[in-house]
Image (cartoon, rainbow, N blue to C red):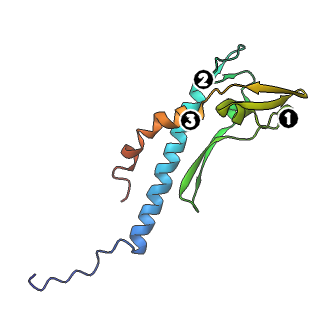
Amino acid sequence: MSGLKITRLFFDSPKVLGAVDTATRKVFSRFGAFVRRTARGSIRKRKASSAPGAPPSSHTGLLKRFIFFSFDPARKSVVIGPMRLTENNRGDAPSALEYGGTVTVDKKNVTVRSRPYMGPAFEKEKAALPALWRDSVK
């Protein structure tokens, strides 16, 4: 090496770390929005119940309306899913629809077979994640 001195090639400089943090927030926020849109789009408004294994039907519109996402800066991750619903004591309904289980409806326990909507939406959008990362750190 002909006297070449390299002094500024460390990836832990504040400028690089700041760019990575900014890119992480943007990429995960976009990914969360894509998964939310796909999950909402899979839920159809109709009076009849959906078949077990298919996305749930929306009878009141609450489930579809209350799917959100949020970037968690402490964990550098995104949380995507429905809020806990409290109308008519149906707080566990979103979880029961996704995984199956028992919910209390009108003071009766009802067993619900799974009608996943978040998991399939995540799997569908997961393939687009590498493209979102491409050229994201500037």
The amino acid type of the residue labelled 3 equals Gly
Give the position of the N terminus as an image quadrant: bottom left
Secondary-structure class at tag 3: helix
Judge from the rendering whether residue 126 lies leftward or rightward of residue 7; answer left or right: right
Give the position of the C terminus as an image quadrant: bottom left
Q: Which residue is mark 1?
A: 89
Counting labels gives: 3
Q: Nearer the viewer, mark 3 or mark 2?
A: 2
Secondary-structure class at tag 1: helix
The amino acid type of the residue labelled 1 equals Asn
The amino acid type of the residue labelled 2 equals Gly
Question: Which one is nearer the viewer's eye here, 135 or 128?
Answer: 128
In the image, farthest residue toward the left? 2
Q: Position of residue 46 (x, y in %)?
A: 68, 15
In the image, farthest residue toward the right? 107
Q: Which residue is mark 2?
A: 53
Q: Earlier in the sequence, mark 1 or mark 3?
A: 1
Q: Which residue is mark 3?
A: 119
Q: Nearer the viewer, mark 1 or mark 2?
A: 2
Q: In whole angstroms, how far apart are the C-alphas of marks 1 and 2? A: 24 Å
Which residue lies at the image location 76% right of the left edge and 37% below the top edge?
Answer: 92
Q: Position of residue 124 (x, y in %)?
A: 47, 33
In the image, farthest residue toward the top? 48
